[in-house]
Amino acid sequence: MSALHQILLALVDRPDVAGALVLGDEGLTIAAALPPGLDPEATAAHAATIWRGVATLGETTGTGTPEELVMEGSAGVTILRQLAPGATLFILAAGDAPDLGRLLHDLRRHAPALMAST
């Protein structure tokens, strides 16, 4: 098992994380630890499309390259965070009201370890 996959498994062991995936810019899965029924390839492809759209929006508005995107939906929260050029982290938060602040803080703090594993 790769170090990156072990890190993703540690993330999903948290009570506030239901799934984690690292994807490439082209929408391919690099490593995944997702709940059953959630297709890693489809998730990576959609996440890459959204990430490219947000990056284009950042260029258009002059706000720059995105570092993180938090999407709150009616049934939960997803997070996209750039780890390194060519690698983005996708997180599916668990529960109705995860401690989003703590989760975001921990993701930012541990991003260097994740980057080193990609």
Image: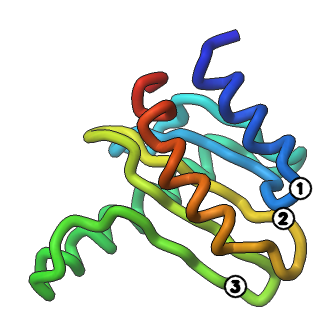
Q: For mark 3, what is the residue? A: 73
Identify the amino acid type marked 2: Ala
Asked if the residues shown at circle 1 and circle 3 are in contact, with their CB atoms under 8 angstroms apart, the answer is no
Residue 77: image x %, image y %?
Answer: 70, 74
Q: Earlier in the sequence, mark 2 or mark 1?
A: 1
Please state which amino acid type lies under the numbered disc 1: Pro
Q: Residue at x 67, y 42 (%)?
A: 40
Element assignment for label 1: loop
Left or right: residue 59 compared with residue 110: left
State the residue lying farthest toward the top.
1
Q: What SS does tag 3 mark?
A: strand
Q: At which x and y percent is residue 58? A: 21, 77
Dot 3 crowding, Cα within 10 Å, few <14, some 14–19, many 20+: few
**Circle 2 or circle 3, nearest the eye:** 2
Asked which quadrant contains residue 53, the reply is bottom left
The answer to whether mark 2 and mark 1 are in CB contact below 8 A is yes
Q: Residue drawn at (50%, 61%), measured in percent from left and top?
A: 80
Q: Nearer the viewer, mark 1 or mark 3?
A: 1
Which structural element holds mark 2? Answer: loop
How far is mark 2 from mark 1, CA to CA? 7 Å
Cα distance, mark 1 to mark 3?
19 Å
Residue 52 at x, y percent in the picture: 31, 63
The label nearer to you, 2 versus 1, is 1
Please name the residue that numbered disc 1 is placed on: 15
Location of mark 2 (residue): 94
Q: Is residue 46 above or below residue 9?
A: below
- Which residue lies at the image location 57% right of the left edge and 62% below the top edge? 105
